[in-house]
Image (tube, rainbow, N blue to C red):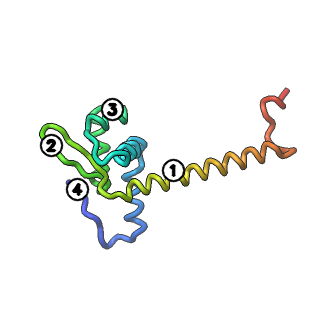
């Protein structure tokens, strides 16, 4: 069963629900694989994530329920694709943001280590 959007919920609640759908590393990896190719078979998703079929099926169900992916059965195979191209854009923005956060954190750490009262390194300890 696919959840229907709550058209009366405040937008911030709808956004939070979307992020709940994204809130697992396997689901992010699935979306990354789908962003790289127009459609991917379940067998390729299993190979690309290292998950067992039953575990991957649960994650794909969550992604479908949150309207992030679409499935198409062709004979015995099922293929998945992103429901919206903006999902790939969201992953790109997240990567950019994380890169900037990590770079800033590393620079701040390096600056704090250079201060006279900064944390002692292993070389400075007796």
Q: Where is residue 123 in the image (x, y as percent from the top left)?
A: 81, 29
Which residue is the site of mark 2?
Answer: 74
Q: Where is residue 67 in the image (x, y as percent from the top left)?
A: 29, 57
Picture layout, residue 104 above or below residue 13: above
Q: Position of residue 38 (x, y in %)?
A: 30, 48
Which is more foreground, mark 1 or mark 4?
A: 1
Q: Earlier in the sequence, mark 3 or mark 4?
A: 4
Q: Tell whether label 4 touches label 3 (CB within 8 Å).
A: no
Which is more foreground, mark 4 or mark 2?
A: 2
Residue 47 tag number: 3
Residue 71 tag number: none
Callout 3 environment at 10 Å: few (<14), some (14 to 19), or many (20+)? few
Q: What residue is at 43 percent from the left and 42 percent from the top?
A: 25
Tell me how far mark 1 sits from mark 4, CA to CA.
Answer: 29 Å
Q: Tell whether label 2 touches label 3 (CB within 8 Å).
A: no
Which residue is the site of mark 1?
Answer: 95
Q: Which of marks 1 and 4 is nearer the N terminus?
A: 4
Which residue is the site of mark 4?
Answer: 2
* Circle 2 SS class: strand
* Circle 1 SS class: helix
Q: What residue is at 40 percent from the left and 42 percent from the top?
A: 29
């Amino acid at each position: 069963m696919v959840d229907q959007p709550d058209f009366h919920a405040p937008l911030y609640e709808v956004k939070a629900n979307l992020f709940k759908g994204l809130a697992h590393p396997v689901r992010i990896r699935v979306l990354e694989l789908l962003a790289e190719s127009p459609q991917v078979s379940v067998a390729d998703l299993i190979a690309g994530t290292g998950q067992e079929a039953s575990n991957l099926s649960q994650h794909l169900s969550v992604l479908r329920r949150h309207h992030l992916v679409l499935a198409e059965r062709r004979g015995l195979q099922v293929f998945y694709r992103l429901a919206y191209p903006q999902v790939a854009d969201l992953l790109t923005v997240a990567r950019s943001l994380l890169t900037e956060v990590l770079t800033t954190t590393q620079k701040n750490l390096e600056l704090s280590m250079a201060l006279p009262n900064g944390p002692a390194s292993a070389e400075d300890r007796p």
